Image (cartoon, rainbow, N blue to C red):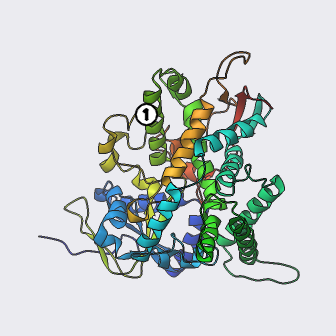
Amino acid sequence: MSQSPRLPYGSPTTLSGISENFALHSSLESFITARTLAFQKAHPHLADARSPIRAKVLNRDIAILSSYDHVQKILCNETIASFVSSGQAYNELMAPFFPPPNLLLLDPPDHQRRKEVWLERMRSLNVDVRTAVRRCVCDHFGSIPPGSVVDLYESMKSLSWRILLSIFLQNEMNGYSGDDASKVEALHEDLLRGQFSLFPISISTPFWRSPRSTGLQARQQLQSILRSKVSRGKCPFAVSNPEEEQDIADHLLLFTSSLAAKSIASLLMAVLLDIFLFNEAGTSLSAKIRNIADAKQRDIYIQSMISEVERLSPPVVGIMRRATKDIVLNSREETIPPTLVPKGWDIWLYFLGAGRDPAAFGETAENFVPSRYLDAPALQQEGLAFGAGAKTCLGKDLIRRVVMAVVETCLEQAPIPEPTGGPMIELQSDGNELAAGLQGWLGWKPKVKPEDWARHMKQLPTQRPRRPIMVKVLHQLAT
């Protein structure tokens, strides 16, 4: 006999919602895992079910989904996807800072029409991405004295800004000065702080501005800068009329955002840690990859490894949707009733948890397996770093090309007559073992405790270590 749907497990009060809001900002992984553990303790027979769990943030009911199947249904099932809205979920957080209409906030059918326009623009991008990225990588690492010890995340954030401004604002190609680039970065940082401020009120006085007010002012300044760049033809998109000019300028605000730079930095940090510091049978991945003689096979292996990083360590841990109709999600266990997500609830699609779901990825779901996607990759479930379905990230292919170009450049052999003829760029550990929470994020260490995630990782707005990860940089580039 079929069972009647029930609400997600948990029954937070408004008072607990206040505390949960601060807990979420402190550590999303700890926030979700703590509720999962409480659920498992109260319902031990449901421990592996990955049933949706209820939370309350800013006095809104939220269903947290960590089942790969549930996340895929919300994003990819055409019927269910029509029952959720990204615009309603993000309007308060995004719309004041990234003016609509934009792809992030649009829902079907308007989203599909506008995305087709932007997919064509991205396909016609007037930039040689590989060459631009290679130049950025060489300039970035070349500015670091060989043997220096650097904070890897901060270094990758600097490189990510350089790459984004080179591609989208043609920084190096059209005389966009370092001072101008620094101004864009600083304004985007102000915008991001305003967007994610725990004090979501805009106040401006002669003596003090709230973070939100400062962020809104930064948005206005950025819009002026970007519109000027577009009108002068200093962006990689063709413009034929004023309406297109405004649309491109508004989307450049997204493409060059601090959130975009930090997301790429998070992904690059994870990729480079895996390549240079992860050991498989006593051999680093960098050595293993360099020893693959066939260039095509080498690229296939690198792409498999990057896909595995996307699965385990997505820069953005999840996204929100708002239910516009009642949604029923079936359980993977016949003994567990389906879950009802009522109309008006928010739905948190937890990519980090779904990407480690054993039902989708088997017994090694929590483990970093760089060769996972080598055999019959079409049969392997993809990670969720770029979302899925109709609203898959517009920049998915571009970012993958960027990451691939960074890896290829780092793994190049130094050209003769360099002194040793060895690797052009090499990263080495500073001698300290990576923290447990960071190893858990990378998939090097399974079953990491929730408190270690909270202590060692920040997860909003993107995933990054709480403390600097120091690495030694060796290279044979001109400084």
The residue sitting at 38% across, 37% down in the picture is 372
Query: In the image, residue 127 lies at what x, y percent?
Result: 60, 50
Which residue position holds label 1? 300
- Say if 336 sits above or below 5 in the image: above
Q: Is residue 48 left or right of residue 451?
A: left
Query: In the image, residue 172 lies at what x, y percent?
Result: 74, 49
As drawn, which residue projects farthest toward the left? 1
Name the amino acid, label 1.
Answer: Ile
**Is 49 in front, or is 93?**
93
Circle 1: is it few (<14), some (14-19), or many (20+) Cα within 10 Å? some
Q: In this view, does 52 lie to the left or right of 243?
A: left
Query: In the image, residue 338 lies at what x, y percent?
Result: 25, 69
- Say if 114 sits above or below 126 in the image: below
Residue 255 occupies quadrant: bottom right
The residue sitting at 50% across, 45% down in the picture is 448
Residue 373 occupies quadrant: top left
Query: In the image, residue 162 lies at what x, y percent?
Result: 70, 49
- Say if 442 sits above or below 416 in the image: below
**Is 92 in front, or is 340?**
92
The residue sitting at 28% across, 57% down in the picture is 45
Q: Quadrant of the image for the C terminus?
A: top right
**Is 101 in front, or is 330?**
101
As drawn, which residue projects farthest toward the right? 207
Residue 402 occupies quadrant: top right
